[in-house]
Amino acid sequence: MRSWLRMFRGRASSLFDAVRSQAADKHSLESDQAASEAIDVRMMRRCVELSRAAGKAGELPFAAVICKDGDVIAETTNQVSRDGDVTRHAEIMAISQAQRALGSTNLQGCTLYTTIEPCPMCSFPIRETRISRVVYAISSPMMGGASRWNVLGDAHISKRMPEAFGQPPEVVTGVLSKEAASVWRKWNPIVWGIIRLRGVFGPS
């Protein structure tokens, strides 16, 4: 009888320890997720501020921020109008800054935040520099590098050319989308109305 009780208590203790360990792991995971979401909101809020400044400076209200471990590595806006160069998109400018700041073309572990879904031109350097996460506010069903052309999610290119392209980044959408849209609407209500009517930006 005593032997049976000892065995029962041992099994009960093991079960209790396992449940407690699972609860601790779940709590840790939830805490990590909450911290990640808080960083996403903070960085996207910075993007929204930068996009507002871009509109006031005569640019289209695009902006991008790259961070690593919660610290900003690069931040910029579109410079197309200023430089008279259609390749000067905010994402490409931010990627260039981040490479210089880190002294490397490998941006693994970095997250790129942008107010609008990156276009295909911007998405290829994201893949080439191995950026780990891409977070954007507003989708671009017509020109998006994820929702339309799937450059960001294409695993085939990294399998066939691993020397050039990293694995598909984690993509998070819709962060502060209303705030980002508000910047565009206030910048030019007519242009924003046409963009929405044509389905250039909006739900994918």
Image: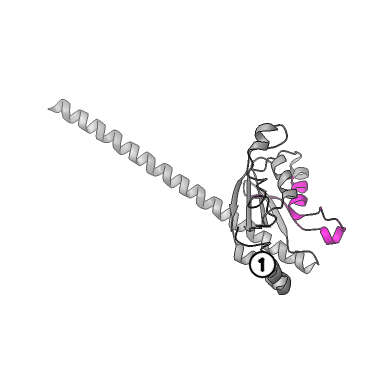
**Does residue 74 belong to the magenta stretch?**
yes
Total marks shown come to: 1
Q: Is residue 57 toward the left or the right of residue 142 in the image?
A: right
- Is residue 2 placed above or below 77 in the rendered structure? above
Residue drawn at (74%, 46%) of the image: 98
What residue does disc 1 label? 196
**Does residue 157 belong to the magenta stretch?**
no
Whether residue 129 is visible, yes or no, is no
Q: Nearer the viewer, residue 121 or 98?
A: 121
Whether residue 17 is visible, yes or no, is yes
The magenta span reads 70-98
Q: Is residue 160 toward the left or the right of residue 173 in the image?
A: right
Q: Could you say where residue 37 lies in the image, as x and y percent from the top left?
A: 55, 53
Residue pushed farthest left?
1
Image quadrant in which the C terminus is located:
bottom right
Residue drawn at (72%, 62%) of the image: 50
Residue drawn at (75%, 49%) of the image: 121
Q: Could you say where residue 146 lies in the image, as x and y percent from the top left?
A: 64, 50
